[in-house]
Amino acid sequence: MVGPDIVAGLGQRFSSGRSVPGARPAHFITLYDAETDKDLDEIVATASAPRTLWVGTGGLAAALARHVGTPHMPVPALPVPFLGLVGTNHEVTMAQVACFSASHADAHIVVERDIDKAKRDLAKRIKRGAPSVVTVAASGDRQMVADHISKVFASLLDGLPMPGTLLVTGGETLRSVCSSLGVVELTVESEIEPGLPISRIEAGVFKGLATISKSGAFGDSALFCRLATPAHR
């Protein structure tokens, strides 16, 4: 087992246990192990109930959609300008940033010490409809870096003009960005590419903004370039 014993941790406060595909849940919280899409389909078929709260990955979401017969939603046209907020140093995302930087002069804004200058530069680019990607220069342990990035993005977003499309990488970064913007909910609308859902921001200063969320390891090196190109939309 990698990581903490989830069942043991949950069991301290709730009735919880493990089950297998095809078996009905026997606890308030039931954890299923699935290896294939068929496993997920069996879990959804046997465990569905009106008040079930599902927690899982995109594979589970796809199984739920198959179960209820949800039609495939076309990818919506994404308005310009594109703004990417990068909160991870994963090598896949760094390759995407490098590819974007090579194709768009001055579009990669690295925030070091002068946040105000970065904010002015970014606001100018947004106002003229130019795409941008922002990274933060940071060092230290993981939690220190995450906290610093959260504070920088919060300051950067305060009073910033709303872009056309927002991309956020990293789960902690997405959480902190949503908190800074006063987001109440992200309503998923479609999936632009595997592992890249498009959501609509509910409430807050950027209400209605199309937002793409991505983990560090998803996408090829040209991803940001495609998203930033109007022809791709």
Image (cartoon, helix red, strand yellow):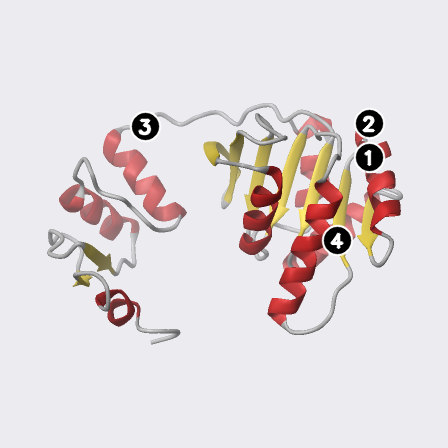
Q: CA distance from mark 3 to mark 4?
A: 37 Å
In which quadrant of the rendered image does the N terminus lie?
bottom left
Whether residue 89 is visible: no
Q: CA distance from mark 1 to mark 3?
A: 39 Å
Left or right: where does residue 91 sit relative to residue 56? right
Q: Is residue 189 above or below residue 12?
A: above
Q: Residue at x 31, y 35 (%)?
A: 65
In the rendered image, which quarter is residue 107 located in?
top right
Q: Earlier in the sequence, mark 4 or mark 2?
A: 2
Q: Residue at x 23, y 69 (%)?
A: 12
In the picture of the structure, the residue carrying the numbered disc 1 is: 123
Q: Nearer the viewer, mark 3 or mark 2?
A: 2
Labelled disc at residue 127: 2
Q: Residues within 10 Å of mark 2 (few under 14, many from 20)?
A: few
Left or right: where does residue 194 sit relative to residue 148? left
Front in this rendered view, residue 54 or 35:
54
In the picture of the structure, the residue carrying the numbered disc 3 is: 70
In which quadrant of the rendered image does the C terminus lie?
top right
In the image, what residue type sits under mark 2?
Lys
Determine whether label 1 and label 2 are within 8 Å by CB: yes
In the image, what residue type sits under mark 1?
Ala
Q: Nearer the viewer, mark 3 or mark 4?
A: 4
Q: CA distance from mark 1 to mark 2?
A: 6 Å
The secondary element bearing badge 1 is classed as: helix
In the image, what residue type sits under mark 4?
Thr
Q: Position of residue 143 (x, y in %)?
A: 60, 68
In the image, what residue type sits under mark 3?
Thr
Labelled disc at residue 135: 4
